[in-house]
Image: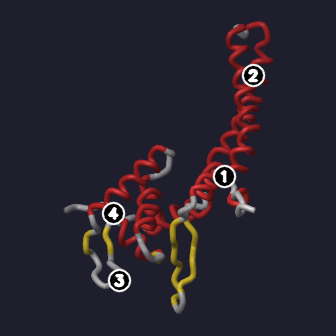
Amino acid sequence: MDTLFQSDNHGDNPGISVSEVETEIVLLFINLAHALGLPKSHGEIFGILFCSPEPICFDDVITRTGISKGSASQGLRLLQRINAVRQVHVARDRRSFFEPELRMRHLLGGFLRETVEPHIQNGANHINHIEKLAGQNGDDLHPVLHERILSLRSWNQKASGLLPWILKLASPSNRPGPPG
Protein backbone atom coordinates (compact mmCIF):
# COMPACT_ATOMS: atom_id res chain seq x y z
CA MET A 1 0.00 0.00 0.00
CA ASP A 2 1.32 3.46 -0.86
CA THR A 3 1.30 5.82 2.09
CA LEU A 4 1.89 9.53 2.45
CA PHE A 5 4.58 9.09 5.02
CA GLN A 6 6.86 6.48 6.46
CA SER A 7 7.17 5.10 9.97
CA ASP A 8 10.37 3.97 11.58
CA ASN A 9 8.52 1.87 14.17
CA HIS A 10 10.53 3.28 17.05
CA GLY A 11 13.73 3.43 14.98
CA ASP A 12 14.07 -0.32 14.41
CA ASN A 13 12.96 -0.61 10.77
CA PRO A 14 13.14 2.61 8.74
CA GLY A 15 10.90 2.70 5.70
CA ILE A 16 8.19 0.33 6.90
CA SER A 17 4.79 1.67 5.82
CA VAL A 18 2.47 2.88 8.51
CA SER A 19 -0.92 1.38 8.96
CA GLU A 20 -3.95 2.33 6.91
CA VAL A 21 -5.55 3.79 10.03
CA GLU A 22 -2.60 6.11 10.62
CA THR A 23 -2.64 7.10 6.95
CA GLU A 24 -6.32 8.02 7.21
CA ILE A 25 -5.68 10.04 10.38
CA VAL A 26 -2.91 11.96 8.64
CA LEU A 27 -5.21 12.54 5.64
CA LEU A 28 -7.83 13.91 8.02
CA PHE A 29 -5.32 16.45 9.37
CA ILE A 30 -4.13 17.31 5.85
CA ASN A 31 -7.74 18.09 4.90
CA LEU A 32 -8.21 20.13 8.08
CA ALA A 33 -5.02 22.09 7.38
CA HIS A 34 -6.28 22.79 3.86
CA ALA A 35 -9.67 23.96 5.21
CA LEU A 36 -7.86 26.31 7.60
CA GLY A 37 -5.67 27.70 4.84
CA LEU A 38 -2.51 26.01 6.11
CA PRO A 39 -0.04 24.08 3.96
CA LYS A 40 -0.52 20.34 3.51
CA SER A 41 2.80 19.72 5.25
CA HIS A 42 1.48 21.27 8.48
CA GLY A 43 -1.36 18.74 8.51
CA GLU A 44 1.08 15.92 7.78
CA ILE A 45 3.37 16.96 10.62
CA PHE A 46 0.53 17.21 13.12
CA GLY A 47 -0.93 13.89 11.91
CA ILE A 48 2.39 12.10 12.32
CA LEU A 49 2.80 13.47 15.83
CA PHE A 50 -0.83 12.72 16.68
CA CYS A 51 -0.43 9.05 15.71
CA SER A 52 2.83 8.54 17.54
CA PRO A 53 2.76 7.11 21.07
CA GLU A 54 6.16 8.74 21.71
CA PRO A 55 7.55 12.20 20.97
CA ILE A 56 9.20 12.38 17.54
CA CYS A 57 12.52 14.06 16.77
CA PHE A 58 12.91 16.63 14.02
CA ASP A 59 14.82 14.25 11.72
CA ASP A 60 12.09 11.60 12.03
CA VAL A 61 9.44 14.19 11.13
CA ILE A 62 11.37 14.80 7.90
CA THR A 63 11.86 11.09 7.24
CA ARG A 64 8.23 10.16 7.89
CA THR A 65 6.71 13.00 5.89
CA GLY A 66 9.28 13.26 3.13
CA ILE A 67 9.21 17.07 3.35
CA SER A 68 12.28 19.29 3.28
CA LYS A 69 14.07 20.46 6.43
CA GLY A 70 12.91 24.00 5.71
CA SER A 71 9.25 22.97 5.39
CA ALA A 72 9.47 20.82 8.51
CA SER A 73 11.09 23.62 10.49
CA GLN A 74 8.57 26.19 9.29
CA GLY A 75 5.66 23.83 9.97
CA LEU A 76 6.83 22.95 13.46
CA ARG A 77 7.38 26.64 14.30
CA LEU A 78 3.86 27.57 13.22
CA LEU A 79 2.33 24.55 14.97
CA GLN A 80 4.17 25.58 18.14
CA ARG A 81 2.96 29.19 17.83
CA ILE A 82 -0.66 28.06 17.58
CA ASN A 83 -0.17 25.64 20.50
CA ALA A 84 -0.78 22.56 18.33
CA VAL A 85 2.69 21.11 19.03
CA ARG A 86 5.14 21.43 21.87
CA GLN A 87 8.82 20.67 22.10
CA VAL A 88 9.71 18.16 24.81
CA HIS A 89 12.90 16.91 26.38
CA VAL A 90 13.83 13.25 26.05
CA ALA A 91 16.32 12.02 28.64
CA ARG A 92 19.86 11.43 27.38
CA ASP A 93 19.04 12.78 23.90
CA ARG A 94 20.10 16.21 22.71
CA ARG A 95 17.81 16.25 19.66
CA SER A 96 14.61 18.29 19.49
CA PHE A 97 11.52 16.17 20.07
CA PHE A 98 7.90 17.14 19.52
CA GLU A 99 4.50 15.93 20.59
CA PRO A 100 0.98 17.08 19.69
CA GLU A 101 -1.31 19.15 21.87
CA LEU A 102 -4.40 17.07 22.47
CA ARG A 103 -6.51 19.57 24.41
CA MET A 104 -9.02 21.35 22.18
CA ARG A 105 -8.91 24.55 24.27
CA HIS A 106 -5.20 24.98 23.62
CA LEU A 107 -5.57 24.21 19.92
CA LEU A 108 -8.51 26.54 19.38
CA GLY A 109 -7.10 29.39 21.46
CA GLY A 110 -3.72 29.26 19.77
CA PHE A 111 -5.22 29.09 16.30
CA LEU A 112 -7.53 32.04 16.96
CA ARG A 113 -4.74 34.17 18.45
CA GLU A 114 -2.30 33.40 15.67
CA THR A 115 -4.60 33.54 12.65
CA VAL A 116 -7.97 35.17 13.29
CA GLU A 117 -6.92 37.99 15.62
CA PRO A 118 -4.37 39.49 13.18
CA HIS A 119 -6.97 39.38 10.39
CA ILE A 120 -9.45 41.30 12.51
CA GLN A 121 -6.81 43.91 13.34
CA ASN A 122 -5.71 44.17 9.71
CA GLY A 123 -9.36 44.37 8.67
CA ALA A 124 -9.88 47.43 10.88
CA ASN A 125 -6.91 49.15 9.23
CA HIS A 126 -8.20 48.26 5.78
CA ILE A 127 -11.67 49.58 6.64
CA ASN A 128 -10.08 52.84 7.83
CA HIS A 129 -8.40 53.11 4.44
CA ILE A 130 -11.69 52.37 2.63
CA GLU A 131 -13.49 55.01 4.69
CA LYS A 132 -10.79 57.54 3.86
CA LEU A 133 -11.17 56.78 0.15
CA ALA A 134 -14.95 56.99 0.43
CA GLY A 135 -14.66 60.37 2.15
CA GLN A 136 -12.46 61.64 -0.69
CA ASN A 137 -15.15 60.62 -3.20
CA GLY A 138 -17.86 62.43 -1.21
CA ASP A 139 -21.06 62.78 -3.21
CA ASP A 140 -19.84 60.46 -5.98
CA LEU A 141 -20.17 57.47 -3.66
CA HIS A 142 -23.35 55.48 -4.22
CA PRO A 143 -25.53 55.41 -1.05
CA VAL A 144 -25.64 51.60 -1.10
CA LEU A 145 -21.85 51.45 -1.10
CA HIS A 146 -21.76 53.89 1.80
CA GLU A 147 -24.13 51.60 3.76
CA ARG A 148 -22.00 48.57 2.92
CA ILE A 149 -18.91 50.29 4.25
CA LEU A 150 -20.79 51.00 7.49
CA SER A 151 -21.70 47.29 7.59
CA LEU A 152 -18.03 46.35 7.22
CA ARG A 153 -17.11 48.61 10.14
CA SER A 154 -19.91 47.12 12.26
CA TRP A 155 -18.93 43.54 11.41
CA ASN A 156 -15.30 44.20 12.25
CA GLN A 157 -16.22 45.85 15.56
CA LYS A 158 -18.47 42.93 16.49
CA ALA A 159 -15.80 40.39 15.60
CA SER A 160 -13.23 42.39 17.53
CA GLY A 161 -15.52 42.49 20.57
CA LEU A 162 -16.45 38.82 20.31
CA LEU A 163 -12.94 37.43 19.89
CA PRO A 164 -11.78 38.14 23.48
CA TRP A 165 -14.82 36.24 24.79
CA ILE A 166 -14.09 33.29 22.52
CA LEU A 167 -10.42 33.34 23.53
CA LYS A 168 -11.42 33.43 27.19
CA LEU A 169 -13.67 30.40 26.70
CA ALA A 170 -10.85 28.62 24.87
CA SER A 171 -8.29 29.60 27.48
CA PRO A 172 -6.76 26.71 29.42
CA SER A 173 -7.01 28.79 32.59
CA ASN A 174 -10.79 28.93 32.16
CA ARG A 175 -11.25 25.28 33.05
CA PRO A 176 -13.96 24.60 35.55
CA GLY A 177 -12.61 23.79 38.95
CA PRO A 178 -13.38 20.64 40.89
CA PRO A 179 -16.88 20.42 42.30
CA GLY A 180 -16.90 21.83 45.67
Q: Which of marks 4 and 2 is nearer the N terminus?
A: 4
Residue type, numbered disc 1: Ala
- Crowdedness near tag 1: few (<14), some (14–19) or many (≥20) residues, C-alpha within 10 Å: some
Q: Earlier in the sequence, mark 1 or mark 2?
A: 2
Q: Quadrant of the C terminus?
A: bottom right
Say which of marks 3 and 2 sits in front.
3
**Element type at mark 3:** loop
To which residue does mark 4 refer?
22
To which residue does mark 1 refer?
170
Residue type, numbered disc 2: Leu
Left or right relative to 90: residue 22:
left
Q: Earlier in the sequence, mark 3 or mark 2?
A: 3
Q: Which residue is drawn at 44% across and 47% down?
A: 34
How far apart marks 1 and 3 lie (CA) works out to: 37 Å
Residue type, numbered disc 4: Glu
To which residue does mark 3 refer?
11
Q: Do the residues labelled 1 and 3 touch (CB within 8 Å)?
A: no
Say which of marks 3 and 4 sits in front.
4
How far apart marks 1 and 2 lie (CA) works out to: 37 Å
